[in-house]
Amino acid sequence: MRGILLLTQTEIMRLRRNRRYVIFTVALPVVLYLLWSKLGKTAYDIPFAAYYMVAMATFGAFAGALNGNSIRISEERKAGWIRQLRLTPLPASGYVIAKILTAMVTTLLSIVIVMLIGRFYGDVHLDAWQWLVVGVIIWLGSTIFAALAVAIGYRYPPDQAQGITILVYFVFSIFGGIWFPLTGSLGNVAKFTPTYDAVKISTDVIGNLSVPGYLIVGLFVWLVIFAGLATLSVRSMAETV
């Protein structure tokens, strides 16, 4: 366990120096919130500023968990870094666990920053329990993409991993209601995405509405799917890394 924590600490320090990671997980969501949060009135039955706070917090965490891991894992696998780690006392699953823990720690920062801006710039007022629940929902709903990042990074070389990651990134952003609220037929399609589940559960909590059970089940189902894909990728590539 000590080896996993040391590797996680190293990964966090590396990401802090990665400008592209900081831009997409912290800077871009903040800029978008400052630009667009006051342009609407309501969305999903709550003030637009509150909805957009949830959306941008989800956007930053989701982008960090997926983009910050998939391509890097693929590059490290190609460079032989994973093979070198296997020569150490680190458990076979230690590398994957460290990547997921890193995503959980680093995405938390982007969520907190966006929510603070939502409170003091967007004038979003919530009860203490609502702030906590919303933050946890966004955090858990977004970091399940760390498992998908492992699946992509382990399975594909860097050039293919980058294209697949970008495709997944845009699909779940657009059809997840992150960039704009979805209604009608698009809203029905969005119900099958984990990003929508995280956003809608959070907005329901803010609006003091009852949260449909299928949204919560949906997040767990996606977690199982992504974790399953990650497990299959790691096992199938075990002899080649």
Image (tube, rainbow, N blue to C red):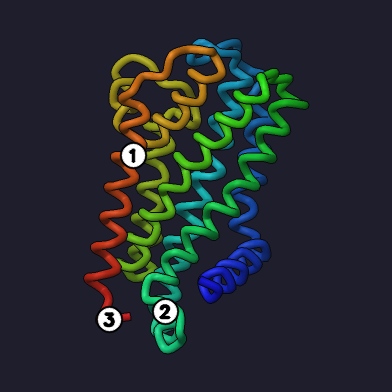
| Among the 4 quarters of the image, the one containing residue 8 | bottom right
Where disc 1 sits, the SS reads: helix
3 or 2: tag closer to the N-terminus: 2
| Whether residue 93 is situated above or below residue 28 in the rendered picture | below
Residue sitting nearer the eye, 50 or 131: 131
> Which label is found at residue 142?
none
Measure how far apart labels 3 and 1 are at the Cα level.
Answer: 31 Å
Q: Which residue is drawn at 67% across and 24% down?
A: 128
Determine which quarter of the picture holds residue 190: top left
Please give the name of the residue rendered at 39% of the width and 69% of the height, measured from the top-left corner.
Answer: 158
* Residue, disc 3: 240
The mark that comes first in sequence, 3 or 1, is 1
Residue 41 pos. (x, y %): 60, 11
Q: Residue furthest front?
A: 1
Q: What residue type is labelled 2?
A: Ile
Q: Callout 2 environment at 10 Å: few (<14), some (14 to 19), or many (20+)?
A: some
Nearest to N terminus: mark 1 or mark 2: 2
- Residue for badge 1: 220
How crowded pointer 3 is (Cα within 10 Å; few <14, some 14-19, many 20+) is rated as: few
Q: Above or below — where is 22 with respect to 191? A: below
- According to the image, label 2 marks what residue? 82
Residue found at the far bottom of this picture: 87
Q: Mark 1: few, some, or many residues within 10 Å (few <14, many ≥20)?
A: some
Q: Position of residue 43 (x, y in %)?
A: 52, 15
Labelled pair 1, 2 in contact (Cβ < 8 Å): no
Q: Give how far apart the Cα atoms at labels 1 and 2 are.
A: 29 Å
Q: Is mark 2 on a helix, strand or loop?
A: helix
Closer to the eye: label 1 or 2? 1
